[in-house]
Image: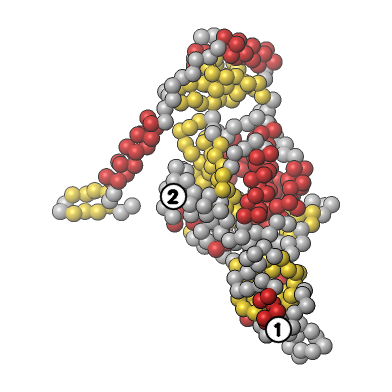
Amino acid sequence: MQNINRHGINFKAFDALEGLKDSLKEIEYQFFKEKKIELSDDQKEDINNNLIEALKNNNYILVKYYEDGYYKFHTGEILKVDKCLVFKDSFKIELNDLCEALIVWYNLNEVFNMDLNYVKEIINKVFLTDSPTGYSFNVDNVIVEELEKLGYNPRITNKGNIELFIEGRDHSKCVATSAHVDTLGLMVRSINSDCTLNVTNVGGPLVPTLDGEYCKIVTRDNKTYTGTILCKASSVHVYSDAKSKERNLDNMIVRIDEVVHNAKDVEELGIQNGDYVCYDPKTVVTPSGFLKSRFIDDKGSVVGILGVLKHFKDTKTLPHYDTYVYFVNQEEVGHGAATVNQRIEEFVTVDMGCVGLDLSGNEFAVSICAKDSGGPYSYDLTTRLINIAKNNNLNYTVDIFPFYGSDIGAAWRSGVDCKGALIGQGVAASHGMERTHLDGIKNTMELLFHYLAD
């Protein structure tokens, strides 16, 4: 922010607005205070028994306590129980302020052990549900169903984003993470007299890789027809430029698998301009652990975040801070996270990492992006992620993404006052026939979990 000098008086622009923001935060803090609930004798006895057992067996324990009008959480090993509950990290809680105590087995300082079986189980469910930008409601329903199975309570916004709020152990800050469910695709531009369809792009597909791809045409009355994306010079036996004709959208059409003889026949099928064309993701997980498919950008991150959320439930872990998780639509066209909650103070989005040229990213590592086409990400948050990866012995790289934008940029452009960072598994051949490795997804999951939980 610039310092301005007027009539010999130095002041910083918008000081009054900054003071107002602090006042509003204080008003909000006071407004949401709660009264302490009185515990029954049975509840007090449960707390006492769990404290004794945890102290005796060196178990980790999760406690809920009341402080200044808010319920808060702390996790750790107990050093002693006297008038106060004292943890080995020197944290103290008055016994009268305790509301709940649960013994948990996990230790966040031990090696993180993420079972990828769940991720592998849901890959096909997520990847094979078509979701080109603007047509995400089917995959939204799949993800909401998974979240509800895990015990979460998500909601779908008017924009089509999935929003999930998780109460943290500490309410002093609000953080967020996201992945985008929308993918690349095509849309019918016009119907030709030879019954083929001209198309326009949805997002930025690598068009030459689409030549010969099987696809589906989805009509506005929910009919689905199959077809093939082809170059107009589609046969080497007929066209002299079949091998050399540029594969761009002006030279590509969709051939429909229906008995039609003219444009009117096509229209009578219910096909019209503006219908979506969804092409086959060709999703495969190889025995060697490679995930090869279209749309790993960003469904690889979607399944990774779902895996992290499952791990929170399996280990009975709560995030450190109040946390919003978003699965957004319309990221591929630049405004996926434009409507995230304005409370968010830190935002780590999960999207594909770049692989190629002089970049250090690879398919086995989590990439931490320092800068993309929109400029640098928040220095201190990015540095903290690097240190988390380093301290937990993760396979990570720090990189510059030369032709790239993410949901952090969308949030910033819409006025969200947050620190922002970008991480993600390295993905080769992005926007074409993509590939990553389950190790890359696992390293990304571990980094995200440690960021949210530690």
For label 2, count other residues whose C-alpha is less than 10 Å away and answer few (under 14), some (14-19) or many (20+): many
Q: Is residue 244 left or right of 447 when viewed as pictured?
A: right
Q: Is residue 10 left or right of 195 when viewed as pictured?
A: left
Q: Is residue 321 above or below residue 264?
A: above
Give the residue at x 68% y 31%: 315
Q: Is residue 407 above or below residue 165?
A: below
Q: Is residue 82 above or below residue 399?
A: above
- What SS does tag 1 mark? loop
Q: Residue furthest front?
A: 268
Q: Is residue 41 among the parts visible in the rendering?
A: yes
Q: CA distance from mark 2 to mark 1?
A: 51 Å
Type of amino acid under label 2: Val
Residue 219, percent from left and from top: 65, 67
Q: Nearer the viewer, residue 204 or 257?
A: 257
Q: Are marks 2 and 1 in contact (CB under 8 Å)?
A: no
Type of amino acid under label 1: Asn
Which residue is under mark 2?
A: 416
Residue 367, percent from left and from top: 63, 52
- What SS does tag 2 mark? loop
Q: Is residue 354 among the parts visible in the rendering?
A: no
Quadrant assignment for the C terminus: top right
Q: Is residue 47 above or below residue 276?
A: above
Image quadrant where residue 222 sits: bottom right
Which residue is under mark 1?
A: 262
Identify the mark at residue 331; answer none if there is no mark. none
